Each structure stands twice: as C-alpha cells, then as structure tokens.
Image (spheres, grey):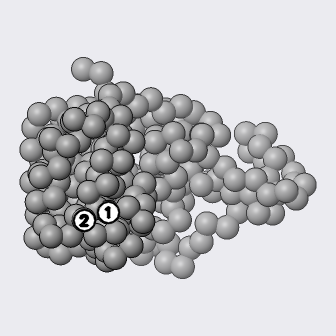
Amino acid sequence: MTPLIKAEHLGKWYRSRRPGTAGADNVTLGRKDRWALRDVSFEVAPGEIVGIIGHNGGGKSTLLKILARITCPSSGRGEVHGRVGMLLEAGAGLHGELTGRENVLFYGQLLGLSLRQVTSSLQTITAMAELEGHMDKALKRYSSGMCLRLAFAVCASLEWDLLLLDEPVANVDHGFQRRCIATMLGRAAQGHAALIVSHDLEFLSKVCTRTLVVCRGSLLFDGSPECATAAYRDWSRRNAGATLAGYVGNTQGEYANG
C-alpha cells in the first residue's frame, strides 16, 4: 500500500547573513544559524491518524509546512500523495470582509473542489461548525473559535485523502472536539489519513493511532500515543530550560520505536 506521506531525512536550516564557519555536514553556520528540523524520516499510511507533539519551536510546524509545500526542505525529501486539506493557522485562507458562506465557497475551491461540490456540502459544514444564523455575517465579526470551527469544518467535510492540521482544537469547546474526533475516525475507517500537531495530549490520545515526538528539530520517538507522551515528558524533565539556540544535535534513536 502506497503511503500518503513519506518523509526521508527531512531537514530545514535557517541562515543568518553573518559569515560563519563550516560545521558538521559542511554546512556553514553563523552565530544565528540553526537547524529547525534535521534528519526526520517517517511514513503515514492510508487509514492512519498520526499526532506530533513537542516543545514550542521544536520543528513541528516547520515539518507540516514542508509537507504542505509552503516551504522547501534544506535536505531530504517529503512525498505527499492524494488530495490534501490543510489547516495550518487559525483562520488561514479565510477573509475577514467575506461572509462565512462566501468563505466556504472560496476556501473549498482553494482546495481544488468545484463550486457544485462545495455548495452541496454547505449545510453539513454549517451544522458541524455550529454557525447556523452566522453564515451571512462577515468573518471579521467572528470570534477566533468560530473561525477555527469554520476552517476545520470546511477541511473535514470536503473530499480529501490527507489532512494536515496544526492545533485544530485550540479555543474550541469539548463538544466540537468530540465532533472532530468522530469525523476523523470515520474518515480513517474509509482509508483517509491525518497528520496533527497539537499540545492537547488528551485529544491526541483519543484520535491518533501513532504519535511522533519532535524535539530540537529531531524525531525523538515514533510509536503509540501513550508511549510517546511518556517519552516527551521524560525528555522535558531532563531538558528543563533548554533552548534551540545554535546547532541542533541529532537525538533520533534515543528511544527505541514503540
């Protein structure tokens, strides 16, 4: 079975304009150069829901942006197959001057769907986002939670093979979280997949089949959500106060795969 995501030794570094000296791998590193991501490899098969956890600035969102083709890797390669829906920032792709209804039509076509396909899903999207009575209001009148619900409902209700999600349940209530879980589990049973970055470990434990731990730009662990949470908490205890300044070492392999 062809994986929907295949990441092979993905890396991303950011260079300063200051001259530096050659470091490992003959990469010239200045004082402000750093690896945001280094040597990350994994696959996501159809039917899998995979979470990503780790500390702030650890490389999680960078990984999603590489897979979404928003930024290019500095090393390695990332293959993504099928129709991809994405929610990488709350409200990304939505326009404040447009109404909720107009945003749904625009956003759906942005994902590559026809106007007829989007229109036929409008009622489902409205109900899932709990925005009955609000769809003809300008989005600038929405709260951040309303915007997030609308963006997720558009992604989740339309045709996709793979979802890339960054903090999809931030600022939403538990009722909406439950609908998110039910929707993604239902899609996974049909062979769809999702890759989800979140700090909500409880949410990930309910929806994910696997969880990756990405810390200091490296893949620390790949296994069950329960073991991933334990590995991340152990790493956090041992690295309290650690920063990402400077060259990022490779921690991959510190834990056996679970």
List x then y, in percent, for residue 171. 28, 75
- Label 1: how many Cα within 10 Å (few below 14, some 14–19, many 20+): some
Q: Quadrant of residue 227?
A: bottom left
- In the rendered image, the vertical position of residue 100 relative to residue 15, given as above or below: below
List x then y, in percent, for residue 182. 9, 54
Tell me which residue sits at (17%, 67%) in the image: 131
Asked which secondary structure carries label 1, the reply is loop
List x then y, in percent, for residue 104. 29, 52
Disc 2 marks a residue whose amino acid type is: Asp
Q: Which mark is residue 136?
A: 2
Callout 1 touching callout 2 (CB < 8 Å): yes
The answer to whether residue 28 is seen in the rendering is yes
Image quarter (top left, top right, bottom left or bottom right) of the N terminus: top left
Disc nearer the start of the sequence (1/2): 1
Q: Which residue is mark 1?
A: 99
In this rendering, position of residue 172 left or right of residue 11? left
* Marks 1 and 2, how far apart at CA: 5 Å
List x then y, in percent, for residue 83. 32, 32
In this rendering, position of residue 247 left or right of residue 19? left
Q: Given the current orientation, which residue lies at the most extreme top position?
A: 1
Asked which secondary structure carries label 2, the reply is loop
Residue in the foreground of this view, choosing between 154 and 176: 154
Tell me which residue sits at (11%, 34%) in the image: 190
Q: Given the current orientation, which residue lies at the most extreme right position?
A: 19
Residue in the foreground of this view, choosing between 164 and 121: 121
In this rendering, position of residue 200 left or right of residue 67? left
- Label 2: how many Cα within 10 Å (few below 14, some 14–19, many 20+): some
Count of numbered circles on the image: 2
- In the rendered image, the vertical position of residue 240 relative to residue 52, given as above or below: below
Q: Quadrant of residue 72?
A: top right
